[in-house]
Image (spheres, rainbow, N blue to C red):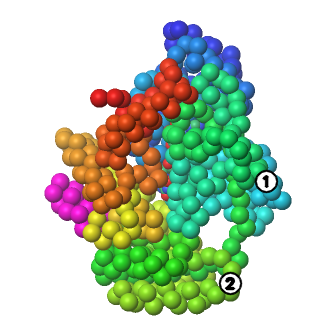
Amino acid sequence: MDNQTLIERLKDIVGPEYVLASAMDLALYSYDASLDKAEPDVVVLPNSTEEVSKVMALAFREKIPILGRGSATNLTGGTIPVKGGIVVHFSRMNRILEIDIPNRTATVQPGVITLDLQTEVLKKGFVYQPDPASQKVSTIGGNIAENSGGPHCLKYGVTSNHILGLELVLNDGTVVWTGDKSRDNPGYDITGLFVGCEGTLGLVTQAILKLERAPEAVKTMLAIYDTIQDGANTVSAIIAEGIVPATLEMMDNQVMRAVEESSKVGYPLDAAAVLIIELDGMPQGMDEKAQKIIQICRQNNVREVKLAKDEAERQDLWAGRKGAFGAMGRLYPSYLCCDGTVPRTKLPEVLNRVLDVGKKYNLPIGNVFHAGDGNLHPLILFDERNPGEKERVLKASSEILKICADAGGTISGEHGVGLEKLKETSLIFCESDLEFGRTIKKAFDPDDILNPGKMIPEPE
Ligand SMILES: Cc1cc2nc3c(=O)[nH]c(=O)nc-3n(C[C@H](O)[C@H](O)[C@H](O)COP(=O)(O)OP(=O)(O)OC[C@H]3O[C@@H](n4cnc5c(N)ncnc54)[C@H](O)[C@@H]3O)c2cc1C
């Protein structure tokens, strides 16, 4: 089918104003928050599952590549249409369909912005836990496809722990449900298979999410360190003590400086690192836990521990952390955000090696990380316009991921594989592991039309 006919067919399905194909539109849909770029042939903005199903059936008949797009904040090239084809942008399917407090669930369309849902359920005294730092912009569909994490995932687990069921549009347009409001369902765990599949097996058109009661009390502390090692050692020591705070987030000096330059939240600029430690739960016993944590911080040479004295101060500390990537982005024209995970006891050693990689390639690296999960995010700053610099950055990033894998960790804590880490899958999977993944992909998508070229590399 030629492109003009495809555009006309899509207009018949979703309406002419919801099909985009001008040169400007295609350029705007050619990038996401990663470093790669490629243009689609056409973009559609459906308004219902039925429309998604018809679009998918058309792609299936004509063997046209197709991928879903939320807010394109993913950091691994997940929404780059490397083989052209159709981009299905879910921005119109952004309705919260139901908040069911007795069953503690919310049913939403995939284009709902994560923070919008969280704000709505909080009004009823409930929380949806997964809180990627991009929550102001990212969508639930994108969070599901990437199995996103966030600061509170240390205590509450990543997205996969909070999804009860999905409505899916399969490769040929068939619509299926994988679960419902019950907590346990018999049969294959298809929900589990689709969460984190990076849109390579089908499109999510509705999701039933788990809600939890909002904690009665919260205590947030900022621990200030003169060495990164002391901060990292504190993280292991707190967990070893049997305390699992809601968050254990860390930032190094480079990142704190960037944050303070963009919005003054009061991070100490002469410190090597800070830890944001948050406790949540019942008020009873929380003071004792906080005292124990302060004692552990002191045993690990903390310079000072500050307690947020009110909600405004707490919000400031979090605004700094959640704005850290954006603040780093102001310093250089481009950055690459690595995403590796290591056993948390290995953090001090791995961080030293990450800094060595920066020196070796002469690239500034700032570190912000979900320290409690051992999840590092070295942010490599560079200028893509300088010849050869992007290649140097990719080599440095690959080396950092190898360091993580060698330390017993893995190549992604939460951002997925996408396009960017296809090569690095060999650091954690052997060929038969990868072949098994290809078998699953073929079972759902034998023609390889669903987000092709992502997550699993072609066989050698
Ligand atoms: C500043 C910043 C901070 C970030 N912080 C975090 C963080 O703390 N934790 C974290 O985990 N990530 C973080 N991220 C990464 C990113 O925000 C997450 O991966 C997020 O879940 C992507 O959501 P999105 O709506 O932007 O999805 P998109 O980027 O649009 O899509 C992501 C993937 O999902 C697929 N997809 C989208 N919608 C659907 C659908 N309905 N059905 C099937 N597939 C679909 C796409 O094809 C793509 O493969 C951050 C990114 C930025 C830029």
Closer to the camera in the image, 394 or 195: 195
Q: How many labels does the image show?
A: 2
Determine whether 444 is above or below 418 in the image: above
Instruction: Work out whether 225 lies above or below 448.
Output: below
- The answer, for residue 378, to whether it is visible in the render is no
Q: Name the residue under label 2.
A: 283
Secondary structure state at the residue bearing disc 2: loop
Magenta part mainly helix, strand or loop?
helix
The x, y position of residue 360, in whole percent, is 15, 57
> In the image, is 362 to the left or to the right of 117?
left
**In this image, 247 relative to 172: left or right?**
left
Asked if residue 91 lies left or right of residue 320, the reply is right
Among the two numbered marks 2 and 1 on one chain, the one whose residue lies closer to the N terminus: 1
Query: Any magenta on residue 359?
Result: yes
Which of the 4 image quarters holds residue 444? top right
Mark 2 neighbour class, 10 Å CA radius: few under 14, some 14 to 19, many 20 or more: few
Label 1 residue SS: strand
Residue 100 sits in quarter = bottom right
Residue neighbourhood size for the residue with mark 1, other residues' Cα within 10 Å, grouped as few (<14), some (14–19), many (≥20) = some
Q: Residue drawn 53% across and 8% down? A: 1
Q: How far apart are marks 2 and 1 (CA)?
A: 27 Å
- Report the magenta residues as a range: 351-366
- The x and y percentages for residue 289 are 56, 86
Disc ID at residue 21: none
Q: What residue type is labelled 1?
A: Ile
Q: Name the residue under label 1.
A: 99
